[in-house]
Structure formats: structure tokens, C-alpha cells
């Protein structure tokens, strides 16, 4: 099945943001990874970035306020990170989303409880414009 253009744009932004983060921390071993949680029942999670025993990273490439479904996506990313036993659990999001996660909520409590570090995404102006255009096409204006 062919990905929609919005999915391609988001995937491209997530890959770029992961590469920027890897460069920032000086770690080139982090890569997207599928982790098997229960082999017998084929239960797995896909992480945007992972290094065995060190890093688990999820990236959410969205700008602006969040609708209910988007908040659920963030909650799902946080749940995935909470299942992994590594010292560095990182959620990379736009500043708008980071500010929302800093407020008092059950999702913010989960971030703190599971020692997940929320990092602001380093969007280039071009990337930010492309994401905003894509969101507008999806009727998700910010």
C-alpha cells in the first residue's frame, strides 16, 4: 500500500529529526528498530530510534495544538517508551507539544513516572513550512 503524501512528509521529518538528534549527542548507532515483546503472539513495537541497552526514541512531527486523536498518538508513544528498559528514553516533539506535555495531566505524569525526557525538535524553517502545509491540507490547521 502506497503511503499518503502526509505520511511521507511526516516520515521524512522524523528521519531528519532523528539524524539531527544523533549528531547532537554524538551517537550514530541509534536507528529505527522493531522490538519483539512477545514472539509467540507476534507482539512488537516499532521505535523511531533505538540502541540496545542505551536509547529508546520516539518522534512526533506535528506543529501546533493537538486534537484528541493526536493526543492519543503522543500517549501511545509514551506507553511504548515506558515498556523499554533503557536509561535514555527520549520523546522528540515540537515546542508547542512540549509545552502541552509540561502542563499537569495524566500524560505528563506518565512522562515523569517513566523518566522520559521530552526534547524540543530542531525544525529547519523549510521543514516547519512543509509540515504546516501538510497539516493544512489534512484540515488540521494550527
Image (tube, rainbow, N blue to C red):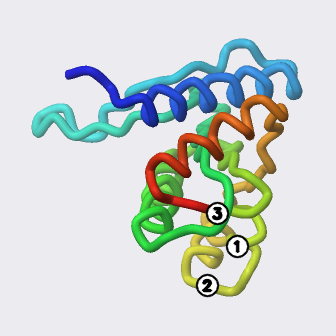
Please indicate whether residue 106 sits to the left or right of residue 26 in the image: left
Q: Which residue is drawn at 31% across and 32% down?
A: 36
Q: Which residue is drawn at 64% across and 63% down?
A: 142
Q: Residue at x 58, y 72 (%)?
A: 110
Q: Which residue is drawn at 79% across and 25% down?
A: 20
Residue lying farthest to the top in this orientation: 28
Is the Cβ of the residue at disc 2 closer than 8 Å to that at disc 3?
no
* Residue for badge 2: 105
Please indicate whether residue 115 sits to the left or right of residue 70 in the image: right
Q: How crowded is mark 3: few (under 14 residues within 10 Å), some or many (20 or more)?
A: few
- Kind of element beneath mark 2: loop
Q: How crowded is mark 2: few (under 14 residues within 10 Å), some or many (20 or more)?
A: few
State whether residue 114 is above or below residue 14.
Answer: below
* Residue for badge 1: 100
Q: What is the number of callouts on the image? A: 3
Q: Where the N terminus falls, by quadrant?
A: top left
Q: Which one is in front in this view, the residue at disc 3 or the one at disc 1?
A: 3
How far apart are the two marked residues, 3 and 1, measured between alpha carbons? 14 Å
Specify the label residue 142 is tagged with: 3
- Kind of element beneath mark 3: loop
Amino acid at each position: 500500500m502506497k503511503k499518503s503524501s502526509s505520511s511521507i512528509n511526516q516520515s521524512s521529518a522524523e528521519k531528519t529529526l532523528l539524524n539531527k538528534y544523533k549528531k547532537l549527542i554524538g551517537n550514530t548507532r541509534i536507528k529505527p528498530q522493531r522490538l519483539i515483546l512477545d514472539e509467540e503472539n507476534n507482539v512488537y513495537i516499532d521505535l523511531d530510534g533505538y540502541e540496545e541497552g542505551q536509547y529508546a526514541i520516539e518522534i512526533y512531527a506535528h506543529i501546533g495544538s493537538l486534537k484528541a486523536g493526536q493526543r492519543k498518538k503522543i500517549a501511545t508513544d509514551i506507553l511504548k517508551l515506558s515498556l523499554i528498559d533503557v536509561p535514555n528514553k527520549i520523546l522528540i516533539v515540537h515546542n508547542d507539544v512540549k509545552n502541552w506535555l509540561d502542563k499537569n495531566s495524566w500524560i505528563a505524569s506518565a512522562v515523569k513516572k517513566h523518566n522520559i525526557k521530552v526534547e524540543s525538535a530542531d525544525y529547519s524553517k523549510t521543514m516547519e513550512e512543509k509540515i504546516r502545509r501538510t497539516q493544512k491540507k489534512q484540515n488540521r490547521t494550527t
